[in-house]
Image (tube, rainbow, N blue to C red):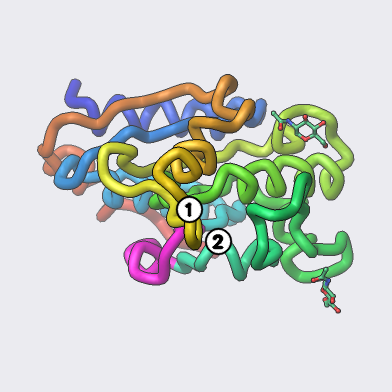
């Protein structure tokens, strides 16, 4: 089995188990990361469940169906790095609040460009919204990206600041389960994608 097919199956199994958790799809360019994510989003949405697609930049957001920029979608504060414990400004009664309470999966693409505090704010907010004390309120979070490429940019920061802001510097990272995509063969999965019923 190639690594993409295995990655897809492992992740869908985690979605179906409904136990949440933090996953990282370690995918250098050209390994079909966007393809695997699209397939997972399509599978969940074909069942009329909700999956939220976020990305650290607008360009990466447009690659995903319904993708949105994480910072604005999650209503994160602009001065993340100066706040000790930032939270998302999302109430339970807002549209986004309802979506976060109901959704089955959040995908965060280009996560290597995200500030660790944005993920920590999401953890805090999901626990609160979902009234669930497990990590991310038992919602499954799928991070995807390539730490070999891009680190978050801290205005006026030194290289040490950049590393400290990186997701890998967060205690949340201790909970991550990593899946690696290494091959670039998309044929088998392409058939699956084209055969989705869409009754929603
Ligand atoms: C949170 O959002 C509300 C609008 O929904 C706004 O009035 C308020 O100023 C925001 N709070 C912060 C801290 O940004
Ligand atoms: C996740 O959020 C909770 C607050 O709801 C906090 O107590 C906990 O330390 C956070 N976990 C991490 C690893 O930041």
Is 139 colored magenta in this rendering?
A: no
Query: Could you tell me which quadrant the N terminus lies in?
Result: top left
Q: Residue at x 36, y 53 (%)?
A: 38
Q: Viewed as shown, does residue 125 lie left or right of 178? A: right
Is 57 colored magenta in this rendering?
A: yes
Q: Residue at x 30, y 25 (%)?
A: 6
Is disc 1 placed on a helix, strand or loop? loop
Could you say where residue 174 lies in the image, as x and y percent from the top left? 57, 20
Check residue 70 in the rendering and tell me which mark sits there, or answer none. Answer: 2
Is disc 2 placed on a helix, strand or loop? helix
Residue labelled with disc 1: 157
Q: CA distance from mark 1 to mark 2?
A: 22 Å
In this picture, is 171 found above or below 81?
above
Q: Quadrant of residue 100?
A: bottom right
Q: Residue at x 78, y 46 (%)?
A: 85
Q: Quadrant of residue 21?
A: top right
In this picture, is 141 found above or below 65?
above
First in sequence, mark 1 or 2: give its number.
2
Query: Could you tell me which quadrant the C terminus lies in?
Result: bottom right
Q: Could you tell me if residue 16 is visible in this image?
A: no
- Ligand 2 image-quadrant field: top right
Could you say where residue 25 lies in the image, as x and y percent from the top left? 37, 35
Q: Viewed as shown, does residue 35 lie left or right of 98? A: left
**In the rendered structure, are the residues bearing label 1 and label 2 in contact, judged by CB atoms less than 8 Å apart?**
no
Q: Viewed as shown, does residue 113 lie left or right of 183? A: right
Q: Which residues, given as a range, are shown in magenta? A: 54-65
Total numbered badges shown on the rendered structure: 2
Mark whose residue sits in front, 1 or 2: 1
Mark 2 CB within 8 Å of ligand 1: no
């Amino acid at each position: 089995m190639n690594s993409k097919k295995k990655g897809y199956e492992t992740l869908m199994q985690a979605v179906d188990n409904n136990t949440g958790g933090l996953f990282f799809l370690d995918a250098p360019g050209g390994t079909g990361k966007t393809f695997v994510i699209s397939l997972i989003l399509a599978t969940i949405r074909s069942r009329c469940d909700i999956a939220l697609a976020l990305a650290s930049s607008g360009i990466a957001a447009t690659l995903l169906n319904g993708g949105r920029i994480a910072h604005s979608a999650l209503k994160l504060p602009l001065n993340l790095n100066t706040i000790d414990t930032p939270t998302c400004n999302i109430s339970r009664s807002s549209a986004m609040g309802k979506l976060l309470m109901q959704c089955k999966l959040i995908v965060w693409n280009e996560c290597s460009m995200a500030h660790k505090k944005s993920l920590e704010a999401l953890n805090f907010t999901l626990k609160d919204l979902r009234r669930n004390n497990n990590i991310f309120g038992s919602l499954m979070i799928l991070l995807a990206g390539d730490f070999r490429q891009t680190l978050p940019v801290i205005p006026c920061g030194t290289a040490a600041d950049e590393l400290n802001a990186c997701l890998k510097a967060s205690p949340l990272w201790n909970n991550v389960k990593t899946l690696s995509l290494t091959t670039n063969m998309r044929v088998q999965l392409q058939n699956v994608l084209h055969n989705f019923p869409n009754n929603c």
